[in-house]
Image: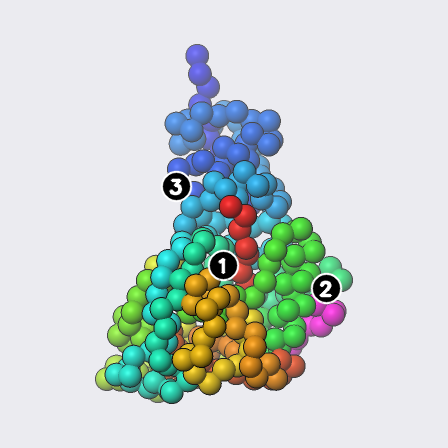
Amino acid sequence: MLKAYTLRIQQPHIRTDSGGMLMFRLARLGVLVAPGLLALVPLVAEAQLSDWPLTPAEERALKPRDEFRECPSCPRIVVVPAGTFAMGSPDSEEGRDSDEGPQQKVTVPQPFAVGKFEITFDEWDACAAGGGCNGYRPSDLGWGRGRQPVFIVSWDDAKAYVAWLSATTGRTYRLLSEAEWEYVARGGSTTPFSFGASISTREANYDGTVPYANAKPGELRQRTLPVGSFKANAFGLHDVHGNVWEWVEDCWHRRHSDMPDDVRKTAAPWVSGDCTTRVFRGGSWADGAAGLRSANRGRYEPYIRNTNSGFRVARTLSR
Protein backbone atom coordinates (compact mmCIF):
# COMPACT_ATOMS: atom_id res chain seq x y z
CA MET A 1 0.00 0.00 0.00
CA LEU A 2 1.33 3.42 -0.95
CA LYS A 3 2.07 5.85 1.86
CA ALA A 4 0.90 9.45 1.48
CA TYR A 5 3.48 12.15 2.07
CA THR A 6 2.69 15.71 3.05
CA LEU A 7 5.73 17.94 2.85
CA ARG A 8 6.40 20.85 5.18
CA ILE A 9 8.93 23.18 3.55
CA GLN A 10 10.08 25.84 5.96
CA GLN A 11 12.42 27.60 3.50
CA PRO A 12 11.01 26.81 0.06
CA HIS A 13 13.68 27.02 -2.61
CA ILE A 14 11.37 26.92 -5.61
CA ARG A 15 7.65 27.34 -5.93
CA THR A 16 5.83 25.98 -8.96
CA ASP A 17 2.23 25.08 -9.69
CA SER A 18 3.16 21.70 -11.15
CA GLY A 19 5.49 20.50 -8.41
CA GLY A 20 8.07 19.61 -11.06
CA MET A 21 10.91 21.57 -9.49
CA LEU A 22 9.99 20.18 -6.09
CA MET A 23 10.61 16.69 -7.51
CA PHE A 24 14.15 17.73 -8.46
CA ARG A 25 14.81 18.89 -4.92
CA LEU A 26 13.40 15.75 -3.35
CA ALA A 27 15.46 13.54 -5.64
CA ARG A 28 18.60 15.34 -4.49
CA LEU A 29 17.56 14.65 -0.89
CA GLY A 30 16.98 10.97 -1.65
CA VAL A 31 13.20 11.27 -1.21
CA LEU A 32 11.05 9.73 -3.94
CA VAL A 33 7.44 10.91 -4.06
CA ALA A 34 5.01 10.62 -6.96
CA PRO A 35 3.78 14.09 -8.09
CA GLY A 36 0.18 13.13 -7.47
CA LEU A 37 0.91 12.45 -3.82
CA LEU A 38 2.29 15.90 -2.98
CA ALA A 39 -1.04 17.18 -1.73
CA LEU A 40 -2.21 14.02 0.04
CA VAL A 41 -2.79 13.66 3.78
CA PRO A 42 -2.34 12.51 6.51
CA LEU A 43 1.17 13.48 7.48
CA VAL A 44 3.52 10.52 7.35
CA ALA A 45 6.90 12.12 6.77
CA GLU A 46 8.41 15.56 6.40
CA ALA A 47 11.23 16.86 4.26
CA GLN A 48 12.86 20.21 4.73
CA LEU A 49 14.55 21.81 1.75
CA SER A 50 17.59 24.05 2.02
CA ASP A 51 18.57 26.93 -0.22
CA TRP A 52 21.31 26.18 -2.70
CA PRO A 53 22.25 27.12 -6.28
CA LEU A 54 20.19 25.64 -9.08
CA THR A 55 21.56 22.75 -11.11
CA PRO A 56 21.62 23.04 -14.93
CA ALA A 57 18.67 20.64 -15.11
CA GLU A 58 16.67 22.76 -12.70
CA GLU A 59 17.43 25.91 -14.67
CA ARG A 60 16.22 24.29 -17.89
CA ALA A 61 12.99 23.24 -16.19
CA LEU A 62 12.09 26.75 -15.01
CA LYS A 63 8.94 28.40 -16.34
CA PRO A 64 7.67 32.01 -16.14
CA ARG A 65 6.46 32.89 -12.61
CA ASP A 66 8.58 30.13 -11.02
CA GLU A 67 10.51 31.39 -8.01
CA PHE A 68 13.79 30.35 -6.44
CA ARG A 69 16.46 31.45 -3.98
CA GLU A 70 20.04 30.19 -4.06
CA CYS A 71 21.20 30.72 -0.50
CA PRO A 72 19.42 31.47 2.79
CA SER A 73 20.33 35.17 2.66
CA CYS A 74 19.91 35.53 -1.11
CA PRO A 75 17.04 37.48 -2.69
CA ARG A 76 13.97 35.64 -3.95
CA ILE A 77 13.97 35.51 -7.73
CA VAL A 78 11.09 35.11 -10.21
CA VAL A 79 11.35 33.97 -13.83
CA VAL A 80 9.96 36.34 -16.48
CA PRO A 81 9.08 35.30 -20.04
CA ALA A 82 10.70 36.29 -23.29
CA GLY A 83 8.80 38.89 -25.31
CA THR A 84 8.74 42.09 -27.33
CA PHE A 85 7.54 45.54 -26.22
CA ALA A 86 7.56 49.21 -27.16
CA MET A 87 10.17 50.93 -24.98
CA GLY A 88 9.51 54.55 -24.10
CA SER A 89 6.33 56.62 -23.97
CA PRO A 90 4.07 57.91 -26.74
CA ASP A 91 3.96 61.65 -27.42
CA SER A 92 0.46 61.76 -25.94
CA GLU A 93 1.41 60.42 -22.48
CA GLU A 94 0.87 62.97 -19.73
CA GLY A 95 4.02 63.88 -17.82
CA ARG A 96 6.25 62.59 -20.60
CA ASP A 97 9.83 63.86 -20.99
CA SER A 98 11.67 64.03 -24.30
CA ASP A 99 14.25 61.48 -23.08
CA GLU A 100 11.51 58.82 -23.12
CA GLY A 101 11.28 58.74 -26.90
CA PRO A 102 10.96 58.01 -29.63
CA GLN A 103 9.46 54.63 -28.79
CA GLN A 104 11.51 51.65 -29.94
CA LYS A 105 10.58 48.01 -30.49
CA VAL A 106 12.77 45.94 -28.17
CA THR A 107 12.97 42.15 -27.94
CA VAL A 108 13.82 40.11 -24.86
CA PRO A 109 14.78 36.88 -26.64
CA GLN A 110 15.17 34.55 -23.66
CA PRO A 111 13.43 34.15 -20.31
CA PHE A 112 15.52 35.47 -17.46
CA ALA A 113 15.05 35.93 -13.73
CA VAL A 114 14.55 39.07 -11.68
CA GLY A 115 14.37 39.92 -8.00
CA LYS A 116 10.77 39.61 -6.87
CA PHE A 117 11.45 42.52 -4.54
CA GLU A 118 13.93 45.35 -4.25
CA ILE A 119 17.06 44.33 -2.31
CA THR A 120 16.38 44.63 1.40
CA PHE A 121 18.50 45.72 4.33
CA ASP A 122 18.58 42.07 5.50
CA GLU A 123 20.05 41.01 2.15
CA TRP A 124 22.49 43.92 2.03
CA ASP A 125 23.65 43.36 5.62
CA ALA A 126 24.33 39.69 4.81
CA CYS A 127 26.64 40.87 2.04
CA ALA A 128 28.49 43.29 4.32
CA ALA A 129 28.79 40.64 7.05
CA GLY A 130 29.99 38.09 4.50
CA GLY A 131 32.96 40.18 3.40
CA GLY A 132 31.28 41.87 0.44
CA CYS A 133 29.80 45.28 -0.29
CA ASN A 134 33.06 46.84 0.94
CA GLY A 135 31.75 46.35 4.47
CA TYR A 136 29.44 49.35 3.97
CA ARG A 137 26.33 49.50 6.17
CA PRO A 138 24.05 52.37 5.11
CA SER A 139 21.91 54.14 7.66
CA ASP A 140 18.20 53.24 7.76
CA LEU A 141 17.32 56.74 9.08
CA GLY A 142 15.49 55.09 11.96
CA TRP A 143 12.90 53.52 9.63
CA GLY A 144 14.08 50.00 10.39
CA ARG A 145 16.17 47.46 8.51
CA GLY A 146 14.90 43.92 7.91
CA ARG A 147 12.47 43.88 4.97
CA GLN A 148 12.77 47.57 4.23
CA PRO A 149 14.41 48.21 0.85
CA VAL A 150 18.04 49.17 1.22
CA PHE A 151 18.73 52.79 0.29
CA ILE A 152 21.58 55.29 0.50
CA VAL A 153 23.37 52.99 -1.94
CA SER A 154 25.10 54.15 -5.12
CA TRP A 155 25.40 52.42 -8.48
CA ASP A 156 28.92 51.43 -7.44
CA ASP A 157 27.49 49.91 -4.26
CA ALA A 158 24.88 47.96 -6.24
CA LYS A 159 27.62 46.56 -8.46
CA ALA A 160 29.55 45.47 -5.38
CA TYR A 161 26.47 43.61 -4.14
CA VAL A 162 25.89 41.66 -7.37
CA ALA A 163 29.60 40.78 -7.49
CA TRP A 164 29.34 39.33 -3.97
CA LEU A 165 26.10 37.50 -4.80
CA SER A 166 27.65 35.98 -7.92
CA ALA A 167 30.72 34.86 -5.98
CA THR A 168 28.58 33.43 -3.17
CA THR A 169 26.31 31.39 -5.44
CA GLY A 170 28.65 30.65 -8.33
CA ARG A 171 25.91 31.96 -10.64
CA THR A 172 25.64 35.10 -12.77
CA TYR A 173 23.81 37.88 -10.92
CA ARG A 174 23.81 41.41 -12.27
CA LEU A 175 21.85 44.63 -12.53
CA LEU A 176 19.04 44.74 -15.06
CA SER A 177 19.60 46.59 -18.29
CA GLU A 178 17.38 49.63 -18.72
CA ALA A 179 15.43 47.86 -21.46
CA GLU A 180 14.94 44.78 -19.27
CA TRP A 181 13.80 46.98 -16.42
CA GLU A 182 11.09 48.68 -18.44
CA TYR A 183 10.01 45.34 -19.90
CA VAL A 184 9.52 43.71 -16.50
CA ALA A 185 8.01 46.86 -14.96
CA ARG A 186 5.38 47.02 -17.69
CA GLY A 187 4.56 43.34 -17.29
CA GLY A 188 2.93 43.33 -20.70
CA SER A 189 1.12 46.65 -20.27
CA THR A 190 1.21 49.64 -22.63
CA THR A 191 -0.27 52.13 -20.14
CA PRO A 192 1.72 54.65 -18.07
CA PHE A 193 1.70 52.24 -15.12
CA SER A 194 1.66 48.45 -15.06
CA PHE A 195 -1.70 48.65 -13.27
CA GLY A 196 -3.32 50.94 -15.85
CA ALA A 197 -3.70 54.55 -16.89
CA SER A 198 -3.25 55.89 -13.35
CA ILE A 199 -2.01 54.83 -9.92
CA SER A 200 -2.98 55.36 -6.29
CA THR A 201 -1.23 55.13 -2.93
CA ARG A 202 -3.15 51.87 -2.41
CA GLU A 203 -0.93 50.43 -5.16
CA ALA A 204 2.46 52.03 -4.53
CA ASN A 205 4.48 54.16 -2.11
CA TYR A 206 4.98 57.71 -3.44
CA ASP A 207 4.05 61.31 -2.69
CA GLY A 208 0.29 61.01 -2.95
CA THR A 209 -0.19 64.77 -2.71
CA VAL A 210 1.01 64.91 -6.34
CA PRO A 211 -1.38 62.57 -8.17
CA TYR A 212 -1.28 61.61 -11.82
CA ALA A 213 -3.65 63.13 -14.36
CA ASN A 214 -7.13 63.39 -12.81
CA ALA A 215 -6.56 60.91 -10.00
CA LYS A 216 -7.45 61.83 -6.44
CA PRO A 217 -4.68 62.79 -3.98
CA GLY A 218 -3.46 60.05 -1.66
CA GLU A 219 -1.13 59.50 1.30
CA LEU A 220 2.23 61.15 1.85
CA ARG A 221 4.17 58.61 3.91
CA GLN A 222 7.58 60.34 3.74
CA ARG A 223 9.51 57.08 4.12
CA THR A 224 10.01 53.64 2.63
CA LEU A 225 7.71 50.71 3.32
CA PRO A 226 8.67 47.02 3.62
CA VAL A 227 9.05 45.35 0.24
CA GLY A 228 5.94 43.55 -0.96
CA SER A 229 3.55 45.92 0.81
CA PHE A 230 1.54 46.21 -2.42
CA LYS A 231 0.30 43.75 -5.02
CA ALA A 232 2.64 42.40 -7.68
CA ASN A 233 2.40 43.26 -11.35
CA ALA A 234 1.53 40.72 -14.06
CA PHE A 235 5.08 39.30 -14.05
CA GLY A 236 5.00 38.75 -10.28
CA LEU A 237 7.25 41.68 -9.31
CA HIS A 238 6.51 44.01 -6.40
CA ASP A 239 7.30 47.73 -6.04
CA VAL A 240 8.37 48.43 -9.62
CA HIS A 241 6.55 51.73 -9.07
CA GLY A 242 7.76 53.78 -6.11
CA ASN A 243 9.36 52.96 -2.75
CA VAL A 244 12.95 53.45 -4.03
CA TRP A 245 14.49 54.25 -7.40
CA GLU A 246 16.25 51.22 -8.89
CA TRP A 247 19.71 51.44 -10.42
CA VAL A 248 20.21 49.70 -13.79
CA GLU A 249 23.38 48.90 -15.71
CA ASP A 250 23.09 51.48 -18.50
CA CYS A 251 25.00 54.68 -19.12
CA TRP A 252 22.87 57.75 -19.71
CA HIS A 253 21.66 58.67 -23.19
CA ARG A 254 19.33 61.56 -24.00
CA ARG A 255 17.02 59.83 -26.45
CA HIS A 256 16.09 56.35 -27.64
CA SER A 257 16.55 57.26 -31.32
CA ASP A 258 20.24 56.18 -31.43
CA MET A 259 19.59 52.86 -29.66
CA PRO A 260 22.15 50.23 -30.78
CA ASP A 261 20.93 47.09 -32.53
CA ASP A 262 21.98 44.82 -29.66
CA VAL A 263 19.69 46.75 -27.33
CA ARG A 264 16.76 46.46 -29.74
CA LYS A 265 17.35 42.79 -30.47
CA THR A 266 18.47 41.47 -27.08
CA ALA A 267 17.61 44.16 -24.47
CA ALA A 268 21.33 44.40 -23.70
CA PRO A 269 22.60 47.27 -21.55
CA TRP A 270 23.51 50.44 -23.43
CA VAL A 271 26.99 51.10 -22.08
CA SER A 272 28.30 53.63 -24.56
CA GLY A 273 27.71 57.37 -24.36
CA ASP A 274 27.78 59.40 -21.16
CA CYS A 275 28.97 56.89 -18.60
CA THR A 276 29.72 59.63 -16.08
CA THR A 277 26.08 59.13 -15.08
CA ARG A 278 24.08 55.92 -14.74
CA VAL A 279 20.35 55.34 -15.14
CA PHE A 280 17.81 54.55 -12.46
CA ARG A 281 14.11 53.79 -12.85
CA GLY A 282 10.78 53.48 -11.08
CA GLY A 283 10.40 56.56 -8.88
CA SER A 284 10.35 56.58 -5.09
CA TRP A 285 8.52 57.43 -1.88
CA ALA A 286 9.60 61.08 -2.38
CA ASP A 287 8.29 61.51 -5.94
CA GLY A 288 4.95 62.49 -7.40
CA ALA A 289 2.97 59.91 -9.34
CA ALA A 290 4.29 60.97 -12.77
CA GLY A 291 7.77 59.94 -11.65
CA LEU A 292 6.57 56.36 -11.20
CA ARG A 293 5.54 55.85 -14.84
CA SER A 294 7.06 52.79 -16.51
CA ALA A 295 8.81 54.96 -19.13
CA ASN A 296 10.18 57.61 -16.76
CA ARG A 297 13.96 57.83 -16.48
CA GLY A 298 16.45 59.32 -14.05
CA ARG A 299 20.21 59.51 -13.69
CA TYR A 300 22.97 60.24 -11.21
CA GLU A 301 26.71 59.89 -10.96
CA PRO A 302 27.57 56.28 -10.05
CA TYR A 303 29.07 57.25 -6.69
CA ILE A 304 26.02 59.22 -5.44
CA ARG A 305 24.10 57.78 -2.48
CA ASN A 306 20.55 59.06 -2.01
CA THR A 307 17.87 58.39 0.59
CA ASN A 308 15.50 57.24 -2.16
CA SER A 309 17.78 55.08 -4.34
CA GLY A 310 18.06 51.28 -4.18
CA PHE A 311 18.06 48.44 -6.71
CA ARG A 312 16.89 44.95 -7.61
CA VAL A 313 18.91 42.19 -9.26
CA ALA A 314 18.69 40.03 -12.38
CA ARG A 315 19.88 36.44 -12.83
CA THR A 316 20.97 35.14 -16.24
CA LEU A 317 19.55 31.65 -16.91
CA SER A 318 21.27 28.86 -18.85
CA ARG A 319 19.28 27.32 -21.67
The span picked out in magenta is 133-140
* Residues packed near mark 2 inside 10 Å, few (<14), some (14 to 19) or many (20 plus): many
**x and y, in percent, of residue 312 in the image:** 53, 66
Name above or below for residue 185 compared with residue 33: below
The residue that mark 1 highlights is 114
At label 2, the amino acid type is: Gly
At label 1, the amino acid type is: Val
Q: Quadrant of the N terminus?
A: top left
Q: Secondary structure at mark 2?
A: loop
Q: Secondary structure at mark 1?
A: strand
**Which label was assigned to residue 17?**
3
Tell whether label 3 touches label 1 (CB within 8 Å). Answer: no
Q: Identify the residue shown where x is 58% and y is 44%.
A: 54
Label 2, label 3: how far apart the Cα atoms are: 35 Å
Towards the viewer: 233 or 176: 176
Q: How is the image coloured?
A: rainbow
**x and y, in percent, of residue 64 in the image:** 41, 50
Q: Earlier in the sequence, mark 1 or mark 3?
A: 3
Q: Secondary structure at mark 3?
A: loop
Towards the viewer: 123 or 43: 123
Picture quarter containing residue 29? top right
Picture quarter containing residue 316? bottom right
* Residues packed near mark 1 inside 10 Å, few (<14), some (14 to 19) or many (20 plus): many
Towards the viewer: 246 or 60: 60
**x and y, in percent, of residue 150 in the image:** 58, 71
**x and y, in percent, of residue 144 in the image:** 58, 71
**Which label was assigned to residue 64?**
none
Picture quarter containing residue 199? bottom left
